[in-house]
Image: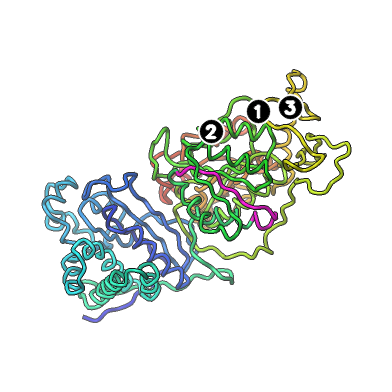
Amino acid sequence: MANTKDILEHVVIRFVGDSGDGMQLTGTQFTDTSAMFGNDVATFPNYPAEIRAPQGSLYGVSGFQVHIGSVEISTPGEDLDLLVCMNPAALKTNLDALKAGHTIIVDTDSFTRKNLEKALYANNPLEDGSLNNYRVIEVGMTKLTKEALKDMGLDNKSIVRSKNMFALGMVYWMYNRDMNHTLEFFERKFASKPLIAAANSKILKTGFYFAETLELIPNSFSIAPSKMKKGTYRIINGNQATAWGFLAAAEKSGLELFLGSYPITPASDILHELVKHKHFGVKAFQAEDEIAGITSSIGASFAGDLAITTTSGPGLALKGEAIGLAMIIELPLVIVNVQRGGPSTGLPTKTEQSDLLQAMYGRNGESPLIVIAASTPANCFDWAFEAARLTLEHMTPVLLLTDGYIANGSEPWKIKSINEMPTITHKQIKNQNSENWQPYNRDKTTLARDWAIPGTKGFEHRVGGLEKDKISGNVSYDSNNHEYMTKIRAEKVQRVKNDIPEIKADFNETGDLLVVGWGGTFGSLHSATKELSKSGYRIGHAHFNYINPLPKNTSELFSKFKKIIVCELNNGQFSFILKSQFANFEFLQFNKIQGLPFGNRELITKFKTLL
């Protein structure tokens, strides 16, 4: 039977199996290969919280979704074109996302009675007709993998673990992907284990050629490279981009970078990434707990470093008192909160935007911070850099919000030169004249105080959590002084409005409906609004990266639309903030708290009811 090749603009693929089946690695390799080819890419890894959930269980399913195309790709996609299932539980939990008439590849060897019972199947779905609406490609991947590797001298466990590469080889053939990138990856990753490298390479090729000769797959597909701005690109996830943004800020400011952190999902990879770059002067400290992590960073800031600390929601709660300390001392410090589902331990591997009010108000006393949010995996680089710039130039802590969706998701990133980055001018005292100097002398524009490093002769001063005299910095219990200092610290944050760009609406600057979002919902909201705008609807999209303070033209923008809907992955926290500041506007809400990002279809349906 002759094979044909169809041309596609984009395709959505999901690899799913047990947490030990290597689905994250499989999806990452397909993503990297597609990016190398020139496709635009967006990914969504989705894995269980347990380190190794019970094999075959419904809650132990691990998945990796990738959306590739020759057109702009801003989300990991919604309806699947291809579902690769390594066991019955993966099929049970993911089938609803597959388009009718589209393809499922299954490892039939895993559809044993025991595994079917674990997945709560009364009958085998491969035999009872329940999959008649789909094109099902049944492959005995486990047996074929064992047969291909039987003479290589590997143990049975190592052989079976390679079957994910059989599936990847099949998908490479189906979508006209080159295997060389993955073959080179095996050589690097298993340089000290050449037998493992050879086994994975052999199985990848076996899956590829199996698909080529399999008459059940009558056609393959081709997706042309995307038209992107010229430059050098690499695939990057949000946590890696965040780490690199801080590296660039340290280089641009001429300061050494210090990270004091305690590992917590999904923020730990920022620590892991920065540890790799000690040659750039990075000092990374894995503390014994969250409090030690942030207080070590405050100490590093006092000593003159660009200091950061990273965490997620539960850790941010523990850091609250120390954040207040950094705020009252008026030292530069960036706190990164990679949000996850809460409260308490909540959903540690799922995404949510439910820490916004904690970021804004989660400290005792009047403790205003600059609060900003990244919105895509790639622009985590820019917002980490911006967080560093703001904290150094305004001498007050900055809280940078990302979330599990963009932290773990990946996309192409155009590599920047350090010369392209804006200048960072910090307040550190070097050789100034100390005559008449006072610790709380302030810049007339920003209200930022000087940053005098301990041991600098003539610039000795006190720091600590007790209220300071507004000039000398000595401890003061004077009631009028406390009120003055409280208000000037708040005013300092508000003056950041003069140092940030105005907010703009995409697609339509005036109209019937303004879609408002913040943080990691950007891709979904952008995609849905773009589709409706192309259909003739007068709809705009305003996405907020600056949360506190808000851009100074926010009210003016709101006044240009008849209706405003605020979409967020929580129960209405940004909407609450907007209502408190702009009482003359009505803010409609669309909220989702399922540990998943917005889907394009659900957004379009909601927006159409308002239009």
Q: What stretch is highlighted in magenta?
A: 249-263
Residue beneath disc 1: 465
Q: How crowded is mark 2: few (under 14 residues within 10 Å), some or many (20 or more)?
A: some
**Left of 148 or right of it: where is 8?**
right
Sequence-wise, the earlier of marks 3 and 2 is 2
**Left of 67 or right of it: where is 160?**
left
**Image coords of residue 339 (percent x, y):** 48, 42
Residue beneath disc 2: 358
**Left of 239 or right of it: where is 390?**
right
> Which residue shows up at 48% across the image and 57% down it?
237
**Outermost residue toward the right?**
435
**Outermost residue toward the bottom?**
2
Q: Which amino acid does label 3 sit on?
A: Lys
Q: Which amino acid does label 1 sit on?
A: Gly
**Image coords of residue 590 (percent x, y):** 47, 39
How far apart marks 3 and 2 lie (CA) works out to: 26 Å
Which quadrant of the view contains residue 553? top right
